[in-house]
Amino acid sequence: MNKPKAPTYFEARKWASFRIQNYSELDMYDVDFLLQKRFGFSTADMLIHYHDQMPPDRWQQFQTDLNQLLLGKPVQYIVQQADFYGMTLTVNQHVLIPRVETEELVDWILSETNDKSQEPLSVLDIGTGSGAIAIALKKNRPDWQLSASDISTEALKVAKENAKNQGTTINFIVSDVFTKIKSAFDIIVSNPPYIATNEEAYMDRQVLNYEPKIALFAADKGLAIYKRLAEGLSSHLKPAGKLFVEIGFRQESAVEHIFKTQLPKSKVRARHDITGNQRMIELDKGDK
């Protein structure tokens, strides 16, 4: 008996749309992301090949991928790719999937340092994970001296691969916050773990089941890393330096208090993301 013929890409996409219709957390973005990233298609390529028959091995791979998606695995981990700031980065379960909200943090840093006449700045990204922030900054400010640290050696392997793939030179350091950092920097940026352990019950199951907990949770109601950052700024942030951090959506006043208590002369201001949630804080050291 002959095996059934593989569908066209259009038919495979339609098949997937029926499979996901009872999964409220999934939509056609996930299906298209699978098709495009797995098979190296742009949106235009998808249209061009819509009515081409899928090779049997691709059809088998797509079915396997979709079954993983239905089981709750994030689409980025299935294809081991994620989009961030115009780049496609490698990701796996040793690093967080970079979020669009973090792109706003990169935007803020770039907008605050747009003076082309200034000397190249030295920048440290603490808890770099996939390297997303550090690489985005380096690509947009190629003269900057970028260092990036993480406590996880497995995460740094991913970050190094991404830096190489994006053609960027970054100094990577294994460090738990400032423990192995010897220099002072013009800019320090961090998207640290900031979720309190007692908030686990309210979290998305996909995140809990697949993303690295070391990059999600922090002690002291999620504030532990901000306190360690504040303690290290006197020696690791230059007198005219700035710190930029991402925060949880209810942490603005608490994090502002931590920084102002540790560095009373500093100027601290917060910014909400595009959806209006508390998201970012900038600290200007104020020792000029």
Image (cartoon, grey):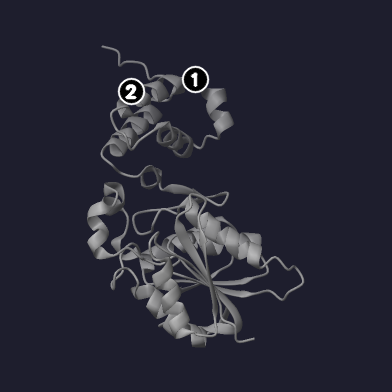
What is the quadrant of residue 153 in the picture?
bottom left
Q: Nearer the viewer, residue 77 or 282?
A: 282
Q: Residue at x 35, y 59 (%)?
A: 94
Residue 175 seen in this snapshot: no
Q: Is residue 265 left or right of residue 9?
A: right
What is the quadrant of residue 226 in the picture?
bottom left
Residue 198 point in image, percent of width and height: 23, 62
Q: Amino acid at mark 2?
A: Phe
Residue 248 seen in this snapshot: yes
Secondary structure at badge 2 equals helix
Q: Which residue is mark 2?
A: 18
Q: Is residue 185 left or right of residue 160?
A: right
Q: CA distance from mark 2 to mark 1?
A: 20 Å
Q: Give the crowd class for mark 1: few <14, some 14-19, many >=20 residues within 10 Å.
A: some
Residue 253 point in image, percent of width and height: 42, 69
Q: Amino acid at mark 1?
A: Asp
Residue 166 point in image, percent of width and height: 57, 56
Q: Nearer the viewer, residue 4 or 203?
A: 203
How many marks can you see? 2
Q: Nearer the viewer, residue 39 or 259?
A: 259
Q: Are marks 2 and 1 in contact (CB under 8 Å)?
A: no
Work out whether mark 2 precedes mark 1 in sequence or the reverse, and give the earlier one.
2
Residue 114 point in image, percent of width and height: 70, 65
Q: Residue at x 64, y 86 (%)?
A: 288
Q: Residue at x 40, y 46 (%)?
A: 76
Q: Is residue 61 left or right of residue 99?
A: left
Q: Residue at x 53, y 55 (%)?
A: 103
Q: Which residue is mark 1?
A: 52
Q: Nearer the viewer, residue 147 or 269?
A: 269
